[in-house]
Image (cartoon, helix red, strand yellow):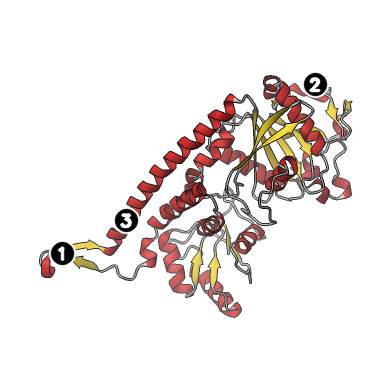
């Protein structure tokens, strides 16, 4: 179920991403429904009329749950469950469910559990039927004691405090590992991007690692770091694969995964992996940039890696392997076209990483280019697939509309 609240709201009329999230959680989507409102209904989010339509649709398909593409308040979720007589889940709860099932490392499990408890703390009233107040004292003498919900909340608060303390230790250990890598003097590169853009596939293709890969959202959650030797520079770099981002990523998850995402914030270079075949490529770039800003990684030099180039149509195929792309008015980033699955463009990406490793200061300044520098940009050499430097005319470069769908 998706609701369009007009300009400024995040609304996907196809609900394709929500369906993919549901499938990633092991659910089978049966039907989709959208609505348009000026504002959420305080009690039922969509209003009683639309809620009745949802109830009839769910009953007709014998559905076991209804998933909303927006965040619901605890009261709205409780009221909807009573009205619809099936389980109700919002986007935040669904993402937390997926993260809980996918976390493998000790750190990942701690982070997901912290986010889950922070989410659950506001929704205790939904799950408990024993909320009568308990009388205190021997033989129930004295006034009313604590409500069960207060005891539950106190237990959750204590658990959250313990998890935060344990994550502080994990963050300290990660800091020690990062300082050890810093002393080696190797360039630190982190892969970031929207979920299912192909980061782990690219990571495996570059490092010959065996990180888990699947065509689903949030296939991997744990950060993996490997050494990547670049023969062109006669030296190695450290490459880290991080958790993918998604629209409306719950703030509790961003906070909980801050220790993991610190790999990106402290990197020397970010490889921003983009699914070139996605019609929502520009929206996904914007969402990743928003999260990078939130974790303090927006000032780290970036290179756009336009992945899945093999899925582009003939009219969308790039004229050159490396060019510049305007991500927002006034800012251009270097962009390289690759296919992590077929190997197309990986040599160009390796040469680019080698150039950065040899002269990091020079390339850091070049990683973000203002459009006011157009004259210098248009005369800049562009590397083709064979590594030859050619000055490409602006018309030879794929434009924004060509690959944004």
What is the number of the mark on residue 155? 3
The relative height of residue 271 versus residue 6 in the rendered view (above or below) is above
Image mark for residue 136: 1
In the figure, is residue 367 to the left or right of 293?
right
Kindly identify the residue that appears in the image at 64 percent across and 55 percent down: 217
Task: Classify mark 1: helix, strand or loop.
Answer: loop
Q: In this view, does 369 lie to the left or right of 262?
A: right
Q: Which of marks 3 and 1 is nearer the N terminus?
A: 1
Judged left or right of residue 355, residue 288 is left
**Which corner quadrant of the image does residue 263 belong to?**
top right
* Residue for point 57% across, 51% down: 9
Q: Distance between the residues labelled 3 and 1?
A: 19 Å
Q: Name the residue under label 2.
A: 375
Q: Is residue 339 depicted above or below 2 in this figure?
A: above
The image quarter in which residue 370 lies? top right
Query: What x and y, as percent, mark residue 368?
Result: 68, 27
Residue 54, image x, y percentages:
55, 72
Q: Give the residue at x 58% y 37%.
A: 292
Q: State which tag comes first along the sequence, 3 or 2.
A: 3
For the residue carrying disc 1, how many other residues have a C-alpha within 10 Å: few (<14), some (14-19), or many (20+)? Answer: few
Q: Is residue 354 visible in the rendered structure shown here? A: yes
Callout 2: few (<14), some (14-19), or many (20+) C-alpha neighbours within 10 Å? few
Which percent across, then down, holds residue 111?
Answer: 48, 48
Q: Does 298 appear above or below 37?
A: above
Residue 390 position within the rendered picture, expressed as x and y whole percent measured from the top left: 89, 26
Q: Which of 120 and 54 is in front in this view?
A: 120
Tag 2 or tag 1, which sits nearer the N-term?
1
Instruction: Using the rendered image of the protein, determine whether residue 327 is visible from the camera's viewpoint.
Output: no
With 386 as the anchor, is 262 left or right in this view?
A: left
- Helix, strand or loop at label 3? It is helix
Label 1 near label 3: C-beta < 8 Å?
no
Numbered tag placed on residue 177 in the rendering? none
């Amino acid at each position: 179920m998706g609701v369009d609240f007009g300009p400024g709201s995040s609304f996907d009329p196809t609900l394709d991403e929500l369906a993919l999230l549901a499938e990633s959680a092991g659910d089978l989507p049966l039907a989709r429904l959208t609505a348009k409102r000026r504002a959420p209904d305080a009690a039922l989010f969509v209003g009683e009329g639309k809620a009745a339509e949802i109830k009839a649709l769910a009953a007709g398909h014998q559905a076991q749950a209804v998933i909303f593409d927006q965040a619901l308040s605890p009261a709205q979720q409780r009221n909807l469950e009573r009205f619809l007589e099936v389980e109700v889940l919002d986007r935040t709860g669904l993402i937390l469910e997926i993260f809980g099932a996918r976390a493998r490392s000790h750190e990942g499990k701690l982070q997901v559990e912290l986010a889950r408890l922070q989410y659950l703390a506001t929704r205790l009233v939904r799950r408990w039927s024993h909320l009568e107040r308990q009388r205190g004292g021997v033989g129930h003498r004295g006034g009313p004691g604590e409500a069960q919900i207060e005891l539950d909340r106190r237990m959750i608060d204590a658990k959250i405090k313990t998890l935060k303390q344990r994550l502080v230790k994990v963050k300290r250990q990660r800091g020690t590992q990062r300082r050890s890598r810093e002393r080696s003097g190797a360039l630190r590169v982190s892969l970031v991007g929207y979920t299912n853009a192909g980061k782990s596939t690219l990571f495996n293709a570059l490092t010959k690692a065996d990180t888990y890969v699947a065509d689903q959202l949030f296939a991997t959650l744990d950060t993996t770091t490997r050494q990547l030797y670049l023969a062109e520079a006669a030296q190695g770099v450290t490459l880290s694969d991080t958790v993918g981002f998604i629209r409306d990523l719950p703030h509790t998850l961003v906070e909980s995964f801050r220790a993991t995402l610190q790999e990106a914030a402290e990197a020397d270079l970010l490889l921003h992996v983009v699914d070139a075949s996605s019609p929502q490529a520009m929206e996904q770039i914007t969402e990743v940039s928003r999260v990078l800003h939130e974790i303090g990684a927006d000032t780290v030099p970036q290179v756009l890696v336009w992945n899945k180039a093999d899925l582009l149509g003939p009219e969308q195929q790039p004229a050159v392997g490396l060019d510049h792309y305007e991500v927002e008015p006034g800012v251009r980033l270097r962009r390289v076209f690759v296919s992590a699955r077929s190997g197309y463009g990986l040599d160009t990406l390796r040469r680019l990483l080698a150039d950065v490793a040899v002269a990091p200061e020079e390339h850091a300044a070049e990683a973000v280019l203002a459009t006011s520098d157009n004259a210098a940009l248009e005369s800049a050499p562009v590397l083709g697939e064979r590594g030859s430097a050619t000055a490409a005319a602006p018309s030879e470069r794929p434009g924004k509309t060509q690959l944004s769908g």
